[in-house]
Image (cartoon, rainbow, N blue to C red):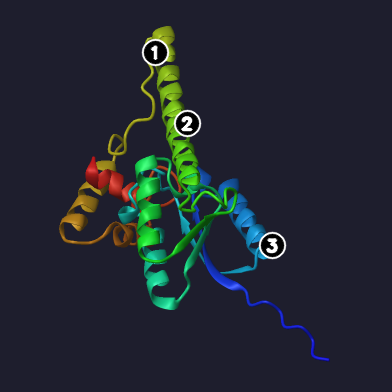
Amino acid sequence: MEAPQKAKLISAFGYLRVSGESQVKGDGPVRQRVAITKWAKEHGFRIVRWFEENAVSGTTETMDRPAFNAMLEALLLNGTRTVLIERLDRLARDVYIQEGTIRLLKEKGFELISVSEPDLNSNDMYRVAMRQIMGVFAELDRKSIVFKLRAARQRKKAATGRCEGRMPFGFREGEQAIIDRIKADRAQGRNYEQIARDLNSEGVKPRTGKWYPANVRKIVLK
């Protein structure tokens, strides 16, 4: 009697995102990877490649996300059709970007699964409405955090007479030269990922951590 054949696992990519440089070495990426891996094993998927977005805000358009763009290119080339994320707010914390990204993937024939909310990406009108409501609350939560931080700075200023907060990059000695170099590189046609890679390889330091395409982009656009 022949042994029963094992079901073939479905290939998938895992997509991770953390928004702050301080979170890159924190629990976020690990937590996301564990959740995705656990769900994949339980549901017959095999993660063949990971794409990790470091220090990229959930309000950043996908066209400016290097890991997302690399993943999209890989999806178009190698036959994998499924992307797994931990939660929808790892895809975006702006409902406009969330819905636009989901629509982009669907139009290209790819499936996006949020392992914590696996039924929210169907075309059922009630599921779509619930997904959009959750996206609105994720956006509201982000704005609430910004509001609370701003209010705390204002209270400190009222109590002490000053609250400068964190000085923008370029305020400290030597930083303006780095800004000028970054903008010159961009004007010559180099993309954010290339500029970040060059700065890191040359030992040019930001305030904390290392350079990522997202913080290079902020300097170019400010």
Q: Of helix, strand and loop, which one carries label 3?
A: helix
Check disc 3 and report the residue beneath it.
42
Is residue 208 rendered to the left or right of residue 182? right
| Nearer to us in this view, 100 or 123 | 123
The mark found on residue 69 in the picture is none
- For this rendering, which residue is in front, 136 or 55? 136
Residue indicated by mark 2: 141
Q: Residue at x 65, y 63 (%)?
A: 43
Q: Quadrant of the N terminus?
A: bottom right
Within 10 Å of disc 2 (Cα), the crowding (few <14, some 14-19, many 20+) is: few
Which of the two residues, 74 or 54, is positioned nearer the viewer here?
A: 74
Residue found at x 35% / y 42%: 96
Report the Cα–Cα distance between label 1 and label 3. 52 Å
Which label was assigned to residue 157?
A: 1
Q: Is residue 115 visible?
A: yes
In three-dimensional space, the C-alpha distance between marks 2 and 1, rounded to whole angstroms, equals: 25 Å
